[in-house]
Image (cartoon, rainbow, N blue to C red):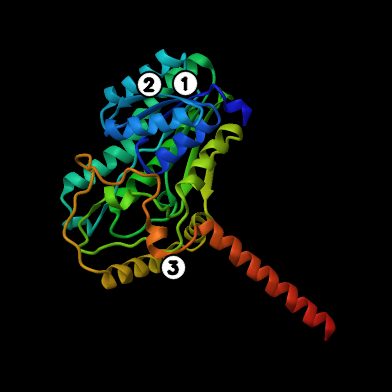
Amino acid sequence: MDSLRGQTIVITGASSGIGRATALAFARYGGRLALGARRMNVLEEVAEQCRQAGGEAITVRTDVIDLESVRALARAADETFGGIDIWVNNAGMGVLGPYAAVPFALHRRTIEVNLLGAMHGAYAALPVFRRQSWGTLINNISIGGWCPTPYTGAYTASKFALRGFSASLRQELLGWPDIHVCGVFPTIVDTPGLEHAANLSGRRINPGPFLYTPEDVANTIVGLVVHPVDEVAVGWPARAAQVAYTLARRPTEWIVGSAMSTVLRHADSAPPYEGALLNPVPQGTATAGGWRERNHVPSARTLTRLGLACIGAALFFASVAYARR
């Protein structure tokens, strides 16, 4: 990964969760980081951690729904470091609840952050990439861009649209072989996302025991810079959901919809919560959301390895028993 040393990386939504983990991952390889988010006090903490990890870092207060704010982030990176090598559109939000029962302002803001925020990032980064004749644009999309879920209509719409937008840009840039547009599709990740998301479902949501870590996603993003691919899943459930939805759309919709409805029906009640959609909130500043710790489970990657090891052992002993017979 020596090729990452001295590379300039711009990351939106860098104050917590996957964005924070990604900033630290690039810093460990000597990256030069321009970090954008709304919470400057938290962003400064991330920048200091990046410097201690071996990278350089600047911070710019950035609200991705404002094109000029995103352009200011791009200018700061370009002027400070002399270009932009990697742009990570990571900022994302969501709202949970029956579509018609959620104030439309929250649906609109979800689209603005997830879709228009990424479009603003691309609009700011691509002119620099074309000037240089190289660059990597990475959109953090989510499993929601492959398989829809109920009670998340605006989130699902934004993620399906972001996947299409990424594909359109790749087609447009066919004549620029060293400019790459990549999409990352994480499964459920243990981040502060639920603390930041709006919840109008009336139910308290627990993401369950099978959770990947923010570092799993961050390492995937770093890997895309070295070996760019169009789309990459983080966690086998994301790829399984894509295949299932492609091959058996109606059964998959029924299964996912029924499962989500069952989870909500049995969850504890909770008051309405607008989260950080409209305004920043002080909570949720770490990389992890603490769900694995509260549920007393290891990461999904570890659980998968244990499961494969158990299956392998069972097959081995079964084959030995069969051979003896």
Q: Residues within 10 Å of mark 3 (few under 14, many from 20)?
A: few
Q: Which one is earlier in the sequence, the residue at label 1 or at label 2?
A: 2
Disc sitting over residue 251 in the figure? 3
Label 2 near label 1: C-beta < 8 Å? yes
Q: Which one is earlier in the sequence, the residue at label 1 or at label 3?
A: 1
Instruction: Answer with left or right where residue 273 lies relative to residue 135.
Output: left
Which residue is label 1 attached to? Answer: 84
Marks 1 and 3 sit apart, C-alpha to C-alpha, by 44 Å
Marks 1 and 2 sit apart, C-alpha to C-alpha, by 8 Å
Question: Given the image, on which type of amino acid does mark 2 rest?
Answer: Ala
Q: Position of residue 36 (x, y in %)?
A: 34, 29
Instruction: Name the residue located 22 percent from the left edge and 61 percent from the top edge.
Output: 201
Quarter-of-image position of residue 140: top left
Please tell me whether mark 3 or mark 2 is closer to you in this view.
2
Question: Given the image, on which type of amino acid does mark 3 rest?
Answer: Pro
Height in image: 282 above or below 237?
above
Which residue is label 2 attached to? Answer: 74
Q: Position of residue 181 (x, y in %)?
A: 50, 33
Q: Which one is earlier in the sequence, the residue at label 3 or at label 2?
A: 2
Q: Is residue 236 visible?
A: no
**SS of the residue under disc 1:** loop
Instruction: Name the residue located 74 percent from the left edge and 73 percent from the top edge.
Output: 316
Question: Given the image, on which type of amino acid does mark 1 rest?
Answer: Ile
Instruction: Name the residue located 45 percent from the left edge and 34 percent from the top edge.
Output: 23
Q: Is residue 1 visible?
A: yes
Height in image: 23 above or below 237?
above
**SS of the residue under disc 3:** helix
Q: Nearer the viewer, residue 201 or 193?
A: 193
Quarter-of-image position of residue 38: top left
Q: Nearer the viewer, residue 270 or 104?
A: 270
How many marks on residues? Answer: 3
**SS of the residue under disc 2:** helix
